[in-house]
């Protein structure tokens, strides 16, 4: 599992360790979603977040935060996941070695334990799919205190983004791409595959196009009608993209591995480093359309979920 130890007062870790899609990706998803909320839903979301604000004493990783409430809320779940022991809720480690022929209708139970409490200070069990459903159930329950519903809303906004990052639905015995060492263009030192998909590819595109997050969100908003609002389906979709594109477009290829427990992250890093893989313009050009599609889908699906809430 990709939980990492964190000193609660330290914020020196990279964005890759703290935020799926990075700050920009989550904010872009939230802004796309906001554009497709019904007027009643938008008013309810704004009211809930305004009246139940994020604790101002909480250390926030994303320093450049939009004034927009839903965009700011989109990264909160990463800020508190080591405090609330919910790091495991941000992903589901489906092995890449699972045959594609078994995917349709397949349960995630082997890789997704039921939601439960923290025991002896350890992570709360669960995964991104049942965590979304769990927090949605709280958000739908109008008998719950508003502060609890606001927290559930912030979780939903964030976790719907997480599940659309393909490396949050996949594992090649490498902690979702965190146990890797790839060359990212001419950057030194090598970067992790997970970091590339969390933020490096998006940041490179934002910089080259000279766009803000809000402008980027508008450029990606191309319309989308989801055939399913089932998070399990979304996880399998992301898993297939990881197999076909995230790993599939790497040259030379990283061999598929069966999961082992415990695994040796350093040994995996060294093994991939020996392949001397460079992620350059060809990979960037292949990855970017997938990133565009996943950010757009996440925004539309988040809006659809929120529009169904009995506010």
Image (spheres, rainbow, N blue to C red):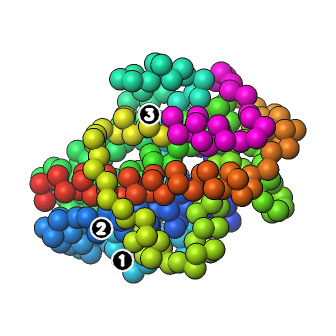
Residue under label 1: 68
Q: Position of residue 128 (x, y in %)?
A: 42, 41
Distance in Å between CA atoms under marks 2 and 1: 10 Å
Of 34 and 51, which appears nearest the observer?
A: 34
**Residue depth check, mark 2 versus mark 1: number of the one nearer the observer:** 2
Of 70 and 220, which appears nearest the observer?
A: 220
Residue under label 3: 236
Q: Are marks 2 and 1 in contact (CB under 8 Å)?
A: yes
Q: Which mark is residue 34?
A: 2
Side (left or right) of 257 relative to 291: right
The answer to whether residue 15 is visible is yes
Residue at 36%, 62% in the rendered image: 222
Quadrant holding the C terminus: bottom left
Q: Position of residue 280 (x, y in %)?
A: 74, 56
Residue 109 among magenta residues: no
Q: Secondary structure at mark 3?
A: helix
């Amino acid at each position: 599992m990709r939980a990492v130890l964190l000193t609660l007062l330290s914020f020196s870790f990279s964005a890759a360790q703290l935020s799926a899609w990075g700050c920009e990706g989550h904010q872009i998803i939230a802004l796309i979603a906001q554009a497709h909320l019904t007027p009643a839903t938008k008013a309810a979301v704004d009211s809930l977040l305004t009246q139940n604000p994020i604790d101002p004493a909480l250390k926030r990783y994303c320093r450049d935060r939009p004034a927009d409430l839903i965009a700011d809320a989109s990264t909160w779940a990463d800020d508190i996941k080591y405090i609330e022991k919910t790091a495991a809720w941000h992903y589901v480690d489906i092995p890449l070695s699972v045959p594609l022929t078994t995917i349709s209708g397949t349960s995630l139970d082997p890789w997704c334990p039921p939601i439960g409490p923290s025991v002896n200070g350890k992570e709360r069990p669960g995964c991104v799919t049942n965590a979304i459903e769990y927090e949605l159930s709280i958000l739908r329950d109008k008998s719950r205190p508003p502060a609890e519903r606001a927290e559930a809303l912030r979780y939903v906004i964030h976790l719907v983004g997480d599940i659309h990052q393909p490396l949050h639905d996949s594992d090649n015995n490498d902690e979702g791409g965190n146990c890797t060492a790839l060359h990212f263009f001419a950057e030194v030192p090598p970067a992790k595959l997970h970091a590339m998909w969390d933020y490096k590819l998006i940041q490179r595109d934002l910089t080259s196009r000279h766009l803000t997050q809000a402008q980027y969100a508008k450029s990606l908003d191309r319309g989308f009608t989801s055939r399913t609002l089932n998070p399990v389906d979304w996880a399998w979709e992301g898993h297939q993209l990881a197999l076909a594109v995230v790993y599939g477009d790497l040259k030379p290829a990283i061999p598929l591995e069966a999961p082992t427990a415990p695994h040796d992250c350093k040994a995996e890093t060294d093994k991939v480093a020996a392949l001397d893989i460079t992620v350059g313009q060809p990979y960037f050009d292949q990855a970017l359309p997938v990133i565009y599609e996943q950010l757009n889908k996440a925004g539309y699906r988040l809006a659809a979920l929120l529009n169904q809430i009995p506010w």
